[in-house]
Image (spheres, coloured by chain):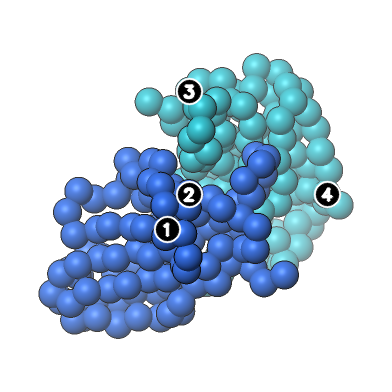
Amino acid sequence: NAGVMQNPRHLVRRRGQEARLRCSPMKGHSHVYWYRQLPEEGLKFMVYLQKENIIDESGMPKERFSAEFPKEGPSILRIQQVVRGDSAAYFCASSPPNRVDGYTFGSGTRLTVV
Amino acid sequence: GQQVMQIPQYQHVQEGEDFTTYCNSSTTLSNIQWYKQRPGGHPVFLIQLVKSGEVKKQKRLTFQFGEAKKNSSLHITATQTTDVGTYFCAGGYNAGNNRKLIWGLGTSLAVNP
């Protein structure tokens, strides 16, 4: 049973480009969460999605950031027109549909904006 | 809004010493979860506490949930270098369909061999 798969592991983008981060949840998990982490800092919640629905996006910046979790395929976190301040580790986590349980995290995508 | 405060932010111990990190919530929690993140790694789920006054043990780790379900602690007995990392607590609140957790800022543990 594969865990949460995130790709790419490392992503380098120039300022102004777009970054697309992908997350495939664990098999059987229908809840996906995205977090951002700066070096030596805690986890900052960004967005919580279920299939085809955004449940809570209170942590998402209002501009340039968007997320989706389509019926088929992985969840995507999209950052348009990246700036240096977007450089961070982005973690995706998933949880099962029918019980409150711990999250399973992916290995993260380290985004570097140059 | 809901907040989870975690202390201390950093802890440096000699191998063999004990370590404790504490979490406090501004409001009553439905559950609390604990995670460990090794340097350069991703958070890994350790345990979930649900009941008032609950105590759970995992080898040298002891987790407690307060009677009022507003605070929790993680205690490590006789630390080892493999315990190095950041320990996060994350609180769940009864919020209908929203399963978002509120995270503490973590306690970074360094262990001197």
Q: CA distance from mark 3 to mark 1?
A: 32 Å
User: Are dots 2 and 1 in contact, CB under 8 Å?
Assistant: yes
Labelled disc at residue B58 = 4
Residue corresponding to mark 1 = A69
Q: Secondary structure at mark 3?
A: loop
Residue positioned 48% across, 35% down in the render: B98
Residue corresponding to mark 3 = B26
As shown in the figure, which amino acid type bears the numbered disc 1? Phe
Q: Chain of mark 2?
A: A
Residue lying farthest top?
A: B68
Q: Quadrant of residue B16?
A: bottom right
Q: Secondary structure at mark 1?
A: loop
As shown in the figure, which amino acid type bears the numbered disc 4? Gln
Residue corresponding to mark 2 = A50
Image location of residue A14, percent across then percent down: 19, 81
Q: Is residue A113 above or below residue B83?
A: below
Q: Secondary structure at mark 4?
A: strand
Image location of residue B112, percent across then percent down: 66, 65
